[in-house]
Structure formats: C-alpha cells, structure tokens
Amino acid sequence: MVGLFKHPKRRLKKLVRDGEYDVAIEFGKSLESKYSDDPDFMFIMGSIFYILEDSKRALPYFEKSFLLNNSDIETLNLKTNTHLALEQKDDAIDCCKRIIQLDPKNSEAKKLLEELENI
C-alpha cells in the first residue's frame, strides 16, 4: 500500500480501476501542477472525464497529452471520439489524418475519415 503513496499515478489509476471517479478527479486535481508536463498523467485525467462522458472537460487533457507526446495513437483515438461527441467534425477529421500519418495501416481511422468527409 505504501507504493501507492510514493507513486501517485499508480494510485490515480487504481482509483479509476475501482470506479472511484470523483475521488480520482479530486486527487488528480491536487497533482495537476506537479504533473502538468506528464503526458501519461494528462491522458489518465482526460480518460476519467471521457468515461464520465464529460467531453468538454476531457478534451483539454487529451490535447495537452498529445502536445507532450505527439506519437500516441491511443490519445488521438480518444481525442477524435471526444471531438465527435462535441460535434467538432473538422477537428475529428484532423485527428483521423494524424492517426493515418502515424499508422498508415490504421483501418479504423481510414474508415472514420471517409465517413466524416462524406457527411
């Protein structure tokens, strides 16, 4: 148990796994200034809001995570879905194009891009 307090990101992940989202948000907010340049932390925080279907609060975390690690396809996938939830079609298209640049064989992104461009 001591390890969870020495490694706050582990504790944050455990709270999320246990479905303790309100506690995780509170705890994450208390860590935010210390971990503001950590893409993994930003991804975790964005994911909490994504799980809670709070796209407006999730998006800034995914944007910061991707800014810090611009080769993370998982972040881009969630960022795409978040833009879609917010009805931001052009931003979702941009994300799909970035995914395809990073992973030219990504059939999901290709299919979604095709669908979005035909709307």
Image (tube, rainbow, N blue to C red):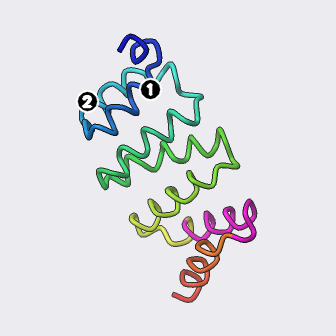
Q: Rate crowding at label 1 as few (under 14), some (14 to 19) or many (20 or more) other CA atoms within 10 Å.
A: few
Give the number of marks: 2
Q: Which residue is mark 2?
A: 23
Relative to the observer, which residue lies in front, 98 or 111?
Answer: 111
The correct choice, above or below, for 48 with respect to 111 in the image is: above
Residue type pointed to by label 1? Arg
SS under mark 2: helix
Residue 10 marker:
1
Q: Residue furthest front?
A: 1
The correct choice, above or below, for 43 with respect to 106 in the image is: above
Q: Rate crowding at label 2 as few (under 14), some (14 to 19) or many (20 or more) other CA atoms within 10 Å.
A: few
What span is colored magenta in the figure? 92-105
- Please check the rendered image and state whether residue 102 is part of the magenta-colored stretch, yes or no: yes
User: Mark 2 vs mark 1: which is more N-terminal?
Assistant: 1
Relative to the observer, which residue lies in front, 110 or 68?
Answer: 110
Q: Residue at x 67, y 63 (%)?
A: 99
Residue type pointed to by label 2? Val
Q: Residue at x 55, y 47 (%)?
A: 63
SS under mark 1: helix
**Alpha carbons under labels 2 and 1: distance apart:** 14 Å
The correct choice, above or below, for 12 with respect to 94 in the image is: above
Relative placement, left or right, of 109 versus 52 is right
Q: Quadrant of residue 5?
A: top left
Give the percent coordinates (x, y) of residue 40: 55, 36
The correct choice, above or below, for 82 with respect to 112 in the image is: above
